[in-house]
Amino acid sequence: MSSVPARTGRQRQRYEDNFRLVSGCIPYRWRKDKTDQMGETEEIIEVLMVSSPKRDDLVFPKGGWEDDETVTEAACREALEEAGVKGILREIPLGIWEFRSKSSQDLCSMEGGCRGYMFALEVTEELETWPEQKNRARQWLNIKEAFKLSRYDWMCNALEAFLRVMAEDRKLEKQDQDAEPSSIVVADVPECQNMSPNCYKRSSTMQHHGMPPNANLLSRATQEIAIHFGY
């Protein structure tokens, strides 16, 4: 059983402009798939979602950003508490989204508003037990499944931003096969280990994408992304 209990209560919760500040991540992994006609094994990307305790839906791990931690530490903590995973966190957020709780307004501020920072987390360790295991089940999904099961627009927008980041990483890998691309160099590992044992931070040369516009996400995905991510 995990020796680290999940945090509870709102004593240390951060607020800004009447929004409750939230931090979370899209955990992901690469999985080898079927062999193509050339005899090469293909890789597909999968993302991890967890069940909601009081609703019949799946969400990405996220929760309140508290005043004794950085936003990246909060994202790593939520991944551990809700999904039981550790990994390498890309320290530039996928975006910042403002949304309103549709299930219970007191989950966010008095007005029901949250401001959420979402990150990409490459999973390196999947724990057999974790703090919220009794209330949350985890499920690995391909990208098409994740889009279909994302209940809110902001979740779909975060997935689209995630795909752009992953596609850019693939382009960099193709451009330089003999050296690690700068976007996947692990930076500040000793500092990150001291502050948060749940993840390492990954530096990136990519610009912050911000909030993509709401649209038909699957139809707007490029052919290259569709090939890489299996939809």
Image (cartoon, helix red, strand yellow):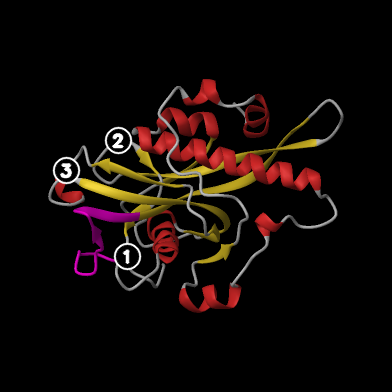
Residue neighbourhood size for the residue with mark 2, other residues' Cα within 10 Å, grouped as few (<14), some (14–19), many (≥20): few
Please report contact status of discs 2 and 1: CB closer than 8 Å, yes or no: no
Q: Position of residue 104 (x, y in %)?
A: 16, 43
Look at 45% across and 58% down and name the residue there: 84
Q: Amino acid at mark 1?
A: Ala
How far is mark 2 from mark 1, CA to CA? 22 Å
Q: Position of residue 16 (x, y in %)?
A: 24, 58
Q: Earlier in the sequence, mark 2 or mark 3?
A: 2
How far is mark 3 from mark 1, CA to CA? 21 Å
On screen, residue 195 versus residue 54, left or right, reads: right
In reply to whether residue 147 is colored magenta, the answer given is no
In this rendering, is residue 42 above or below 22? above
Instruction: Check the picture and name the quadrant holding the C terminus.
Output: top right
Look at 63% across and 27% down and name the residue there: 226
Look at 40% across and 28% down and name the residue there: 214
Q: Position of residue 192 (x, y in %)?
A: 53, 73
Q: Earlier in the sequence, mark 2 or mark 1?
A: 1
